[in-house]
């Protein structure tokens, strides 16, 4: 089914997630009761509240917060502002958060929030009132707090909204030392961590790079090993899409297509992502980009001739309606749920590989975890060690110089002697997490004779880890 140029799946999003869950669950020996407990959404808070528009009229706004699993606390997940957000969607996204956190060993349960608004229709002051009121509602019902539920940015939200949430929570919980750990993705001066803004896109890059570096997998797809020269199409040039495209381009891939709301552009010789982003900022559209061909809809870009397709906008983009037309060999799910369960089967049957969302976009929650830790410890990463490391490195270089009787250039000294600052540590922690998790999922797939998909392997990993924490509690045998 297609509505306004969007392929719409007739199966609800939470059912799509559960369909994938069931497929993996059938391969485990966990008791059915335990599997059911892992799968269900623990609690959903649906709220409606009034908002005064700048012109004086009153509107009612619908919003949700879903907490999928309390096997670990706090629970964690983004808040999205979108006109079509609904209860089923936040429950599905909360479930994905549970599995995502387990896959990257982040000790949180899964949650997700949504406010049913198109943010572009509201002024900054209206958005501030909506965000603060939403936070107030969450506080009232105990759906937010550093040890309870910690939101983060998602589709349609960013650092500004997180700053409003932190400020509202802080002002209503007088004297709580860890108040700023109630939300992540904040601006750095408000307790954010360096590297959070680009974290999801950077994680997407690490995940794709890791996949491209496995010769057997690339050979099976008919692609060469390594990222260099691979032709990439990215759908959605928001936070995740822009940063993924930027890091992929810097890593040697060629960005041949970009899709946004208004349509898509294509140039087989490559597009510069910063130029495209600048043009969109200035002209409110990516179309008519110099030396590129315009395509009428975002969906057209999904069917472009390329090696790697990165859907980084919303769910339900590749369905049974267009799966047969996808030419990319590797589909990298940067968005949550961009490929429906049936379409996944069709793509795999056609010999393609999908890097699943619940692994690939986990960079955001990984760095959110680092931010939360920073907020609880009240100290910037690297503050205690940077100068110490630098001094050790300088002494080491000096000792080598004395030994060989030659001096390093000041350029070399400044590069090697450098101590790690907060951003270096965050990037390094993220790279370690994404690379390890990928190898882990691949290993699970290999243990099943390479007969299961990476998605099923990722679910198996998540199910086993969540099951283990219930067993630790002694609730299940
Ligand atoms: P965003 O709001 O920053 O960007 C989304 C972009 O997609 C916008 O530029 C929007 O105009 C564009 N878009 C919307 N519909 C489109 C369509 N049909 N075709 C092409 N472009 C379209 O959102 P984001 O934070 O980048 O999130 C994107 C996806 O990544 C979502 O599925 C979200 O759940 C997921 N995600 C985000 C994060 C995060 O840290 N922000 C973390 C994990 C997963």
Image (spheres, helix red, strand yellow):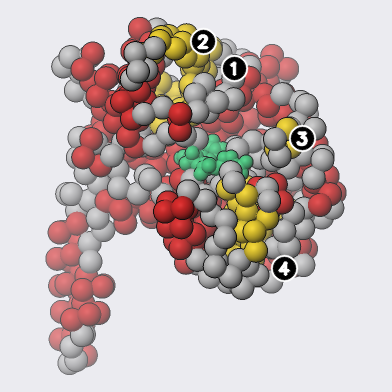
- Residue 470, quarter of the rendered image: top right
Contact flag, marks 2 and 1 (Cβ < 8 Å): yes
Count of numbered tags = 4
x, y percent for residue 330: 70, 56
Q: Is residue 269 above or below residue 389?
A: below
Residue identifier under label 3: 2
Q: For label 3, count other residues whose C-alpha is less than 10 Å away and answer few (under 14), some (14-19) or many (20+).
A: few
Q: CA distance from mark 1 to mark 4?
A: 40 Å
Rendered view: 349 above or below 105: below
Between marks 3 and 1 in the image, the one whose residue lies nearer the viewer: 3
Label number found at residue 87:
1
Above-or-below relation of 248 to 94 = below
Dot 1 crowding, Cα within 10 Å, few <14, some 14–19, many 20+: some
Kindly state the secondary structure of the residue where label 3 is placed: strand
Residue for point 74% across, 54% down: 303
Residue 365 appears left or right of 257: left
């Amino acid at each position: 089914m297609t509505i306004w140029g969007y392929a719409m799946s007739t199966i609800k999003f939470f059912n799509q997630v559960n369909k994938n869950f069931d497929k993996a669950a059938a391969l485990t020996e966990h008791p059915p009761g335990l599997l059911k407990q892992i799968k269900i959404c623990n609690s959903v808070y649906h709220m409606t509240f009034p908002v005064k528009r700048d012109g004086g009229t009153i509107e009612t706004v619908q919003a949700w917060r879903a907490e999928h699993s309390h096997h670990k606390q706090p629970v964690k997940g983004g808040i999205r502002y979108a006109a079509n957000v609904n209860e089923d969607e936040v429950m599905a996204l909360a479930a994905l958060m549970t599995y995502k956190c387990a896959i990257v060993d982040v000790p949180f349960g899964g949650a997700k929030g949504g406010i049913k608004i198109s943010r572009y229709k509201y002024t900054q002051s209206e958005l501030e009132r909506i965000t603060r009121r939403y936070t107030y509602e969450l506080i009232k019902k105990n759906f937010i707090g550093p040890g309870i539920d910690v939101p983060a940015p998602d589709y349609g939200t960013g650092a500004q909204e997180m700053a409003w949430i932190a400020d509202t929570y802080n002002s209503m919980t007088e004297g709580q030392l860890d108040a700023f750990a109630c939300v992540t993705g904040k601006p750095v001066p408000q307790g954010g961590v360096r590297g959070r803004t680009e974290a999801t896109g950077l994680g997407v890059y690490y995940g794709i790079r890791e996949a491209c570096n496995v010769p057997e997998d690339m050979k099976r797809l008919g692609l060469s090993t390594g990222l260099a020269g691979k032709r990439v199409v990215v759908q959605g040039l928001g936070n995740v899409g822009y940063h993924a495209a930027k890091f992929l381009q810097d890593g040697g891939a060629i960005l041949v297509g970009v899709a946004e709301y208004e349509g898509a552009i294509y140039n087989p010789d490559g597009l510069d992502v910063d130029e495209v982003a600048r043009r969109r900022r200035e002209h409110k559209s990516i179309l008519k980009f110099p030396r590129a061909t315009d395509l009428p809809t975002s969906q057209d870009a999904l069917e472009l001739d390329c090696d790697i397709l990165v859907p980084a906008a919303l769910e339900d983009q590749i369905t049974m309606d267009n799966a047969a037309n996808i030419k990319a060999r590797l589909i990298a799910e940067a968005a949550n749920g961009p490929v429906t369960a049936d379409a996944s089967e069709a793509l795999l049957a056609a010999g393609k590989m999908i890097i699943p969302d619940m692994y690939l976009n986990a960079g955001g929650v990984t760095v959110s975890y680092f931010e939360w830790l920073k907020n609880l410890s009240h100290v910037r990463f690297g503050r205690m060690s940077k100068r110490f490391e630098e001094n050790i490195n300088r002494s080491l270089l000096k000792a080598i110089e004395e030994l060989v009787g030659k001096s390093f250039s000041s350029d070399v000294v400044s590069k090697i002697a450098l101590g790690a600052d907060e951003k270096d540590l965050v990037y390094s922690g993220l790279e370690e997490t994404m690379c390890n998790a990928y190898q882990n999922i691949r290993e699970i797939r290999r243990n099943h004779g390479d007969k299961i998909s990476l998605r099923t392997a990722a679910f198996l990993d998540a199910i086993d880890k969540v099951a283990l924490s219930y067993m630790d509690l002694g609730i299940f045998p």
